[in-house]
Image (cartoon, rainbow, N blue to C red):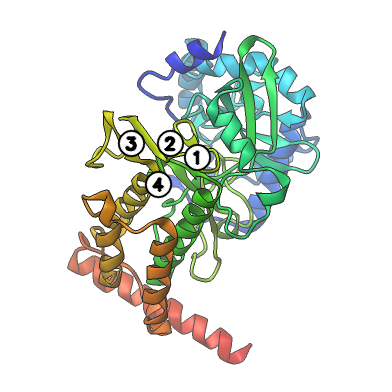
């Protein structure tokens, strides 16, 4: 199967079998560590020697009755859990990817058979029942060091590959203001001469889990404005820096890892995880997807045409009248700040002057990225440091929810202060 058919197979989205959360017990760290190890052994193609013993240590909710097991077996025979067309694309390339040093999950191995067959385990709690969500990207483990990565299908030698590689070149890849996803590897698809594979560190959506404190929002604003300033300093306009194209390295929030598709679960897909807070465990944000980005030569005009992009509120988009691509980026990011934060939470009114400037309808009245970052710093210096740890309160939060969440926040802050006094 070629890349085009794999993309077409995504019609309607690729689903994931979600667990019945009402049946999930509280996460137990010792069991989590054990099952993470079992998953790594499975990815290496080995069946753990103590698999039977491990099953005895699993929580009760992962098992089903004999009647349910028989029903699951029939559903499996009828193809309910079979690979779909897009997944077959990756299954066919698994040996090649393995040779290149990237291990896919057991579901995509050549000789895969469902791990729940012949057992009384619920398929939803078996890691190899979890399907891809985005068909053109698959998660993998880099075998040389165990790093979690994402492998994306791209057109060989197109602008996305060229710009992403340019922003990952050695002299800028470690720059503190560079918030562009790093390219780790690029290699051709042996099955399709027109496509290639782009390997990047695994990232998760910037807003998953939700933000919890005012200081977490200010850090997001700072990092993304820094990243946009750096991007423009390299003569690159993203042109689609909307919410879907900003991700984060969530490792600090999930120090023991999480499943790459069922992100709220442990790597084995069994336990529901409770993330740590960003305010105490800072994360780093990244721009991704340079598919419609522009790289300008020194002195070249930044004026472009085209209506592509996720943000349809941009007033100047046109297929005929050129517009400044850098000012487009400023509007898109400012609009994200407005919609994802100011319109969603109370207590962020101090960001309104920045957002209003960035989303001015007339591009000439918008600041460039560097000036927007300077405005942010002026705002940030005027904030009381204690405000940054205040809980974010959603605008659609009910009174009972507010009482509950405020109580939890006060308790958490008390523990935080006590630790700092004692420690």
Circle 4 crowding by C-alpha within 10 Å: few under 14, some 14–19, many from 20: many
User: What residue is rendered at 35% in x and 48% in y?
Assistant: 327
**What's the CA distance linking mark 2 and mark 3?**
28 Å
Secondary structure under badge 1? loop
Q: Earlier in the sequence, mark 1 or mark 2?
A: 2
Q: Give the residue pinned by disc 1.
A: 262
**What's the CA distance linking mark 1 and mark 2?**
8 Å
Of badges 1 and 3, nearer the viewer stands: 3
Circle 2 crowding by C-alpha within 10 Å: few under 14, some 14–19, many from 20: few
**What's the CA distance linking mark 1 and mark 3?**
25 Å
Q: Give the residue pinned by disc 3.
A: 310
Asked if the residues shown at circle 2 and circle 3 are in contact, with their CB atoms under 8 angstroms apart, the answer is no
**Vertical placement of 1 versus 340: above or below?**
above
Q: Which of 158 and 61 is in front in this view?
A: 158
**What's the CA distance linking mark 1 and mark 4?**
36 Å
Of badges 1 and 4, nearer the viewer stands: 4
Q: Give the residue pinned by disc 2.
A: 18
Q: In which quarter of the image is the N terminus?
A: top right
Circle 1 crowding by C-alpha within 10 Å: few under 14, some 14–19, many from 20: many
**What's the CA distance linking mark 2 and mark 4?**
41 Å
Secondary structure under badge 3? loop
Q: Give the residue pinned by disc 4.
A: 326
**Image x and y of residue 231, in percent:** 52, 49
Secondary structure under badge 2? loop
User: What residue is rendered at 52% in x and 45% in y?
Assistant: 235
User: What residue is rendered at 50% in x and 15% in y?
Assistant: 6
129 to the left or right of 343:
right
């Amino acid at each position: 199967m070629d890349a085009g058919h794999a993309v077409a197979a995504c019609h309607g989205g690729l689903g994931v079998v979600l667990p019945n959360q009402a049946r999930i017990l509280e996460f137990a760290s010792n069991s989590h560590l054990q099952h993470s190890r079992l998953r790594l052994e499975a990815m290496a193609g080995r069946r753990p020697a103590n698999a039977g013993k491990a099953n005895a240590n699993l929580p009760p909710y992962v098992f089903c009755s004999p009647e349910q097991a028989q029903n699951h077996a029939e559903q499996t025979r009828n193809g309910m859990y079979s690979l779909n067309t897009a997944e077959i694309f990756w299954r066919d390339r698994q040996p090649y990817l393995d040779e290149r040093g990237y291990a896919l999950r057991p579901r995509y191995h050549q000789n895969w058979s469902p791990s729940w067959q012949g057992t009384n385990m619920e398929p939803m709690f078996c890691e190899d029942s979890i399907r891809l969500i985005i068909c053109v990207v698959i998660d993998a483990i880099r075998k040389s060091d165990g790093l979690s990565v994402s492998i994306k299908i791209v057109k060989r030698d197109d602008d996305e590959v060229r710009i992403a590689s340019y922003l990952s070149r050695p002299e800028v890849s470690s720059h503190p203001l560079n918030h562009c996803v790093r390219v780790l590897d690029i290699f051709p698809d042996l099955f399709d001469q027109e496509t290639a594979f782009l390997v990047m560190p695994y990232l998760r959506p910037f807003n998953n889990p939700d933000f919890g404190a005012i200081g977490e929002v200010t850090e997001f604003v700072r990092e993304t404005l820094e990243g946009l300033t750096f991007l423009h300093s390299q003569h690159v306009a993203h042109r689609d820096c909307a919410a879907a194209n900003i991700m984060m390295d969530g490792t600090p929030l999930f120090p023991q890892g999480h499943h790459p598709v069922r992100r709220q679960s442990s790597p084995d897909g069994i336990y529901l995880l409770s993330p740590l807070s960003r305010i105490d465990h800072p994360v780093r944000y990244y721009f991704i997807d340079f598919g419609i980005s522009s790289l300008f030569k020194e002195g070249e005009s930044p004026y472009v045409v085209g209506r592509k992009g996720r943000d349809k509120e941009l007033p100047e988009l046109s297929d005929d009248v050129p517009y400044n691509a850098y000012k487009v980026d400023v509007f898109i990011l400012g609009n994200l700040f407005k919609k994802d934060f100011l319109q969603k939470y109370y207590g962020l009114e101090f960001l309104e002057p920045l957002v209003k400037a960035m989303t001015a309808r007339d591009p000439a009245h918008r600041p460039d990225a560097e000036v927007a970052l300077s405005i942010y710093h002026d705002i940030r210096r005027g904030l009381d440091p204690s405000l940054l740890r205040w809980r974010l309160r959603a605008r659609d939060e009910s009174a009972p929810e507010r009482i509950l969440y405020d109580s939890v926040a006060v308790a958490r802050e008390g523990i935080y202060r006590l630790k700092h006094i004692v420690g």
